[in-house]
Image (tube, rainbow, N blue to C red):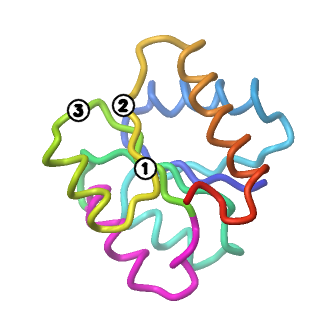
Amino acid sequence: MVIVLVEDDLEDQEFFSDAIRKVCPECSLLTVEHGIEALHLLDKIPIPDLIFTDVNMPIMNGIQLIISLRSLDRFSVVPIVVLSTSASDDIIGTCYDRGATRYLTKPDSKPELEAMVGRIITDYNESSNPLY
């Protein structure tokens, strides 16, 4: 399974990377810092199984990234999971309106993040129409 993480905070990148290694050691994780980097990466690799993105990032934020990806046929069904510190109903609604598959508020602890990521991966692996 190939997972792309779009996250500008280095500590959050490491936190997520540790969680992935624990719950899915066979997963390949590719990390970039903002939406433009994500678009460049995604143009060069086969379609990933999952994309996780933060909302608040420089250069191109998560909402702009979702809009860009959903406008491309090859990413129309790739699950995009927003993982953000924001719990604003407006931001959550906008993410879903623009094509996010799920919206999760970043947890404060590693065990919570591991459980959250584990559920997403399990849902993906068990579903014929992942995460929808």
Q: Nearer the viewer, mark 1 or mark 2?
A: 2
Relative to residue 76, is residue 47 drawn left or right? right
**Marks 1 and 2, Cα distance to the nearest angstrom?**
11 Å
Q: Which residue is mark 2?
A: 105
The residue that appears at 37% across and 62% down in the rendered structure is 35
Placement of the C terminus among the 4 image quadrants: bottom right
**Of the numbered discs in the image, which one, if any, rests on residue 87?**
3
As helix, strand or loop, the secondary structure at mark 2 comes to strand
Residue 59: name its quadrant.
bottom left
The residue that appears at 68% across and 61% down in the rendered structure is 49
Asked if labels 3 and 2 touch by Cβ distance under 8 angstroms, the answer is yes
**Of the numbered discs in the image, which one, if any, rests on residue 3?**
none
Q: Which residue is mark 1?
A: 53
Looking at marks 2 and 3 on the same chain, the residue that comes earlier in the sequence is marked by: 3
Q: Position of residue 81 (x, y in %)?
A: 47, 50
Q: Amino acid at mark 3?
A: Ala
Residue 111: name its quadrant.
top right
Looking at marks 3 and 1 on the same chain, the residue that comes earlier in the sequence is marked by: 1
